[in-house]
Image (cartoon, rainbow, N blue to C red):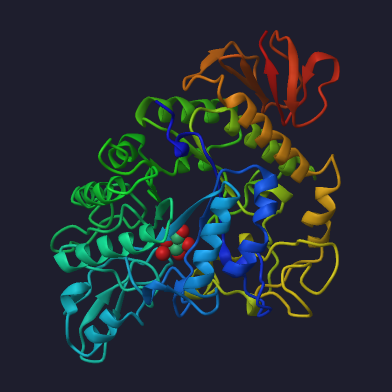
Amino acid sequence: MDTPWWRDAVVYEVYVRSFADASGDGVGDLPGVRERLPYLKDLGVDAIWLTPFYRSPMADGGYDVADYRDVDPLFGTLAEFEALVADAHAHGLRVIVDIVPNHSSDRHPWFQEALRGQGRERYLFRDRPNNWQSTFSGPAWTQVADGQWYLHLFAPGQPDLNWRNPEVHAEFLDILRFWLDRGVDGFRIDVAMGLYKAEGLPDVKDQSFKAVSPVWGQPEVHEVYRNWREVLDSYPGERMAVGEVWTDRADDLALYVRPDELHQSFNFAWLQAPWSPTGFKQVIIDTLATVPFATWVLSNHDVVRHRTRYDTADPGTGLMRAKAALLTMLALPGSAYLYQGEELGLPEVKNLPPEARQDPVFFQSKGELPGRDGCRVPLPWTPDGPSLGFSPGDTLPWLPQPDDFPAFNAETQAGDPESTLAFYRRALSTRRDLLRSLPYHLEWLDSPEGALFFTRGPLICAINCGPAPVDLPPHARVILSTAPLPDGTLPPDTATWLHAE
Ligand code: GLC
């Protein structure tokens, strides 16, 4: 039997607002994505994941959905979505869409009705708040005009739905079918561990994030995914779901990917691993031991870009490490998720002026937390122009691009064999060529201090996280490396793929 496409796919996250703007309003949109499909095809990814493009007042960049069955005019139309899916499929690219079941927008008709006093059982209204804090900081409760309070684990504009109400289940099953009928290949499930809260909404002693607490990871949530799996399986063409499950425990993560639940879950442990061979090795061991089909991810629209996370006082180290971590991740069994702009080597934009910031995290924390705008700055496509090719004409993008962004533009990198983009293309096409000969499992090789070596069939992957060069393991030839390998050694902050025989 053929392997289902998603098991070893490379999926590229398109943060739609910041990818490419075709309409000229400074905000990325679906026709912008459609125009750039050839770029994604050339990059060598298998699928794209589109962040929410549904009708939304944009209290959280679209993760506050007012109508789950329509496209926001900011992003295009339903017809333009359908054209994008058709074109993506014609390019051999699958399309995953984001589904946001934990909360709706406060502008959703259900919540508007609730404010008028009808149907409050679809949300979590109480006479008195408990002590829960919002993930975005501040209390997780907001009071309405008649004195009741509603729960929002994120922004006040994102009221949490009550999954103990069967009507909510029926609604989301219908929403899944709506998009499956329009040809989507899968769903990314937002806040997948959050849907159920403990009965009675008890106070918590510890506000820090825990995999399983009265707030997160209630066992009832698994029934939801069993039902969703049945719907996905009833469609032809290997439709899939990947869960956004933030958990600090691999055994908890494993529950979400049981054979009758989600196909995949993001492996945030990889993204959180420190730059060390033991850190990386431990995550790989835990992952392969606990989940049937691994995934790997280094960056997304919620975290500081990995190039910047890996920065040291020495300029250039962050990018070298980012490429080395990427090459290692692409050698691992399972599928890999990339975040737009990492293929250009984009850094986190740290110096956005406060007046430009848009993320509710910045406002809810009263400026104490910078928020996530720094990884969401619109992409630089060309070396010049007011938006570096992001928008047509003179329009400025919704977040300002910093002065060093022209140096990262895609057009120049596409013509430069030494660029980060050229490296990503080589790595992805090589991985695709090798894939058929690679078994799912890996074997560890003895590694010198600071380094990590493993094999997968004929492939040897070696990464050096230490401060000194190390000798390469015995090999027949070099396939690809992130930096030159002088005299058979692997320099610090470098990774390589070698052919064993
Ligand atoms: C997820 C999204 C994030 C959003 C939050 C609330 O974590 O990735 O961007 O703010 O859910 O929907």
- Residue occupying the point 68% across, 70% down: 352
In the visual, does 62 lie left or right of 218? Answer: right
Quarter holding ligand 1 = bottom left
**Residue 465, quarter of picture:** top right
- What percent of the width, then of the height, locates residue 187? 40, 53
Where 7 falls versus 68 (above or below)? above
In the visual, does 216 lie left or right of 343? Answer: left
- Residue occupying the point 80% across, 45% down: 315
- Residue occupying the point 18% across, 63% down: 201
In the visual, does 403 lie left or right of 379? Answer: right
**Residue 252, quarter of picture:** top left
- Residue occupying the point 18% across, 61% down: 202
Give the position of the N terminus as an image quadrant: top left
Q: Which of the pair 285/266 is nearer the observer? A: 266
Where 362 falls versus 237 (above or below)? below
Total labels: the figure holds 0
- What percent of the width, then of the height, locates residue 422? 77, 41
- What percent of the width, then of the height, locates residue 177? 31, 60
